[in-house]
Each structure stands twice: as structure tokens, then as C-alpha cells.
Image (cartoon, rainbow, N blue to C red):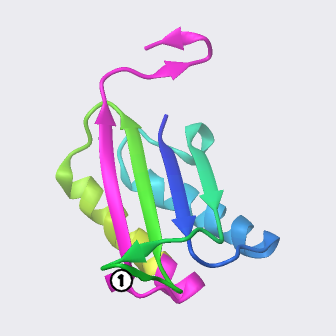
Amino acid sequence: MPYIEVKVTKELDDPTRSKLKDELGKIICNIPGKSEAVTMIGLLGSIDLYKGGKRLTDGAYIEVKTYTETARIHKEKVNKEIFKLLNNLLSIPAANVYITFYDHKEWGYDGNLI
């Protein structure tokens, strides 16, 4: 039950949102046991992001949250693929992207805490 939240400085039109969602759904499959079918994705465009006190015109912050611990080797693959996606689809340079990963031992889903 992963959750991926993407915040970007650029405006996201519907075709771009759809492509971003589809590609993130594929990327999450690099983590064993995770699939697009159980992944929730939040996409936020036109966000103000600042780095070094200066407003970024091309920047992104991504959070990848998973239930249970994910091995570093799988996080590295997801990290690499997200950087590549943001550069290819949105022309956001790697120097202006931060990605954080969170492993959770507890997760609420379908009315239950698992």
C-alpha cells in the first residue's frame, strides 16, 4: 500500500498528470510486493518551492511512503527512476529534486489498522 506524493513547481495539465501517474505506477513495482493496483498517488502542481532562499522555477519534492520496511537497493532503483522521469517528462534538473522515503510499521486501510 504505497503512497507517492509529488509536488512540482510546474503546472500539470491533464495529459501530463496522466503520464506521471502511469509512470509512477510502473516505478513502484521495483519494490517487491508493491504494485500500481494498491498504490495511491497525489499530484500537486504549481507549488512554490524554495532552495537556498530562492524560488525554483523547475523543482520537485517527492515522498514515497510504504507499509513495511523496503530494502535500500529497491529504494535506490525507485529513486533513480523518479529522477529520470521528472527530467524526461517535466525537464526538472536533478539538482532541484528532493525525494524522501518513509517505511511505516502501521498503516490504516479499509477501516483497519494493519
Comparing 61 with 31, the one in front is 61
- Can you give x and y, in whole percent of width and height, for residue 46 in the image? 65, 72
Q: Is residue 105 magenta?
A: yes
Check the image and report above or below for 5 versus 20: above
Question: Which residue bears the numbered disc 1?
Answer: 94
The magenta stretch is: 86-114
Residue placed furthest toward the top: 112
Q: Is residue 59 left or right of residue 47?
A: left
Q: Is residue 5 left or right of residue 102?
A: right
Check the image and report above or below for 40 versus 72: above
Tag 1: Cα neighbours inside 10 Å, few (<14), some, or many (≥20)?
Answer: some
Residue placed furthest toward the right: 14
Q: Residue at x 30, y 24 (%)?
A: 105
Q: Residue at x 35, y 83 (%)?
A: 94
Q: Is residue 31 magenta?
A: no
Q: Residue at x 61, y 51 (%)?
A: 42
Q: Is residue 85 left or right of residue 31?
A: right
Label 1 is placed on what type of residue?
A: Ala
Residue placed furthest toward the front: 53
Check the image and report above or below for 30 versus 102: below
Comparing 87 with 25, the one in front is 87
Comparing 26 with 9, the one in front is 9
